[in-house]
Image (spheres, rainbow, N blue to C red):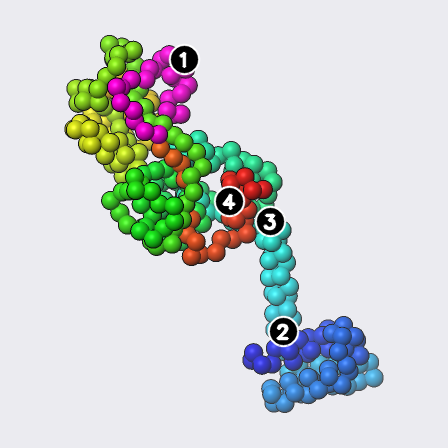
Amino acid sequence: MVENLEYYKVFYYVGKNKSITAAAKELMISQPAVSQSIHQLEKNLGCSLFQRTSRGMKFTAEGDILYRYVERGVDLIDLGEQRLKQLQHLEAGEVRIGASDMTLRFFLLPYLEKFHEQYPGIKVTVTNGPTPETIEYLEDDRIDFGVISTPFSPSDGSHNRRQSDSLAFTGKEGLTYFPVSEIEDVFVAGRRFIQYKNRMLDFSDLEKIPLILLEGNSSTRSYIDKFLSEHGVDIQPEFELSTSDMIVQFALRNLGVGCVVKDFAKEHLDSGVLFELRFNSVLPKRQICVISDESRPLSIAASKLLELIKGEE
């Protein structure tokens, strides 16, 4: 069939115009070339497709049946070309993103808002999950790129990897990332723990305080556990919750001291309802990063969103 495609194209235009002359003009080839293509297709198929009449070319019964299918094929090709043009001009398409509550809320959301304003025809799907899950989604080709927080370990062969960025899992080779923003982890408390306000604490003091932390499958929890362990601190959280918003709510109700990215508690810290515990050593800041798989080409839409995030647009 593949070797007959050009013949089918000629057949379509002859059938549409009911004229060899008109078909030759539209195809910008000679009339003998049109006649030869029709003759060759008829020979290949073993039947006549047209009858010559005083009014032009008329389908045989076999030609009429074949034309119905060829016409559908041409229409589908036209639709495919139109769809491709829509994708190229960002009038349609889809971007699949993986992000945690924190990276979505405090970094990605403004970019999604701007992107949607510029390209309303593009569907954006956000898969919500912690950093390890997001990297798994990327490895499984369920997302185009992810917005995650350090520490993480995409793979031994990934670009831009830092020695301090490590978790207990191995990622696919070819993942690459770049930092886009900084975040700061803090311990916050309400009035029940007022005795700790304005005091300079040691991290070992946390062993005596009821703590509210994220569950253990997040980069934030892994980072806090590793940092405290390196300082000889063994913690046993009172509560382990799935979202930072819930940690703030528990802290507001004086159920313990919560550990969150500072932005989550900013409103309550500014109002004085919560306060931040101070320590005699610094909890280093972390980074929000965009991670992608350079072994897979991105769609035009996904590439455009990344350009927006990088400030290249």
Amino acid type at circle 3 is Leu
Task: Label 1, secondary structure: give it.
Answer: helix
Dot label at residue 271: 1
Residue 77 spot, x, y in % from top left: 61, 66
Q: Residue furthest right?
A: 54
Amino acid type at circle 2 is Val
Amino acid type at circle 1 is Ser
Q: Quadrant of the C terminus?
A: top right
Say which label, 3 or 2, has the lower sequence index. Answer: 2
Task: Label 3, secondary structure: give it.
Answer: loop
Q: Residue at x 33, y 27 (%)?
A: 185
Quadrant of res 11: bottom right
Q: Which residues are magenta?
A: 262-285
- Depth check, mark 3 against mark 4: the one in front is 4
Q: CA distance from mark 2 to mark 1?
A: 71 Å
- Depth check, mark 3 against mark 2: the one in front is 3
Question: Mark 3 = which residue?
Answer: 90
Whether pointer 3 and pointer 2 mark residues with C-beta atoms closer than 8 Å, the reply is no
Dot label at residue 70: 2
Q: Residue at x 28, y 11 (%)?
A: 197
Say which label, 3 or 4, has the lower sequence index. Answer: 3
Q: CA distance from mark 3 to mark 2?
A: 30 Å
- Residues packed near mark 3 inside 10 Å, few (<14), some (14 to 19) or many (20 plus): some
- Residues packed near mark 2 inside 10 Å, few (<14), some (14 to 19) or many (20 plus): some
Whether pointer 4 and pointer 1 mark residues with C-beta atoms closer than 8 Å, the reply is no
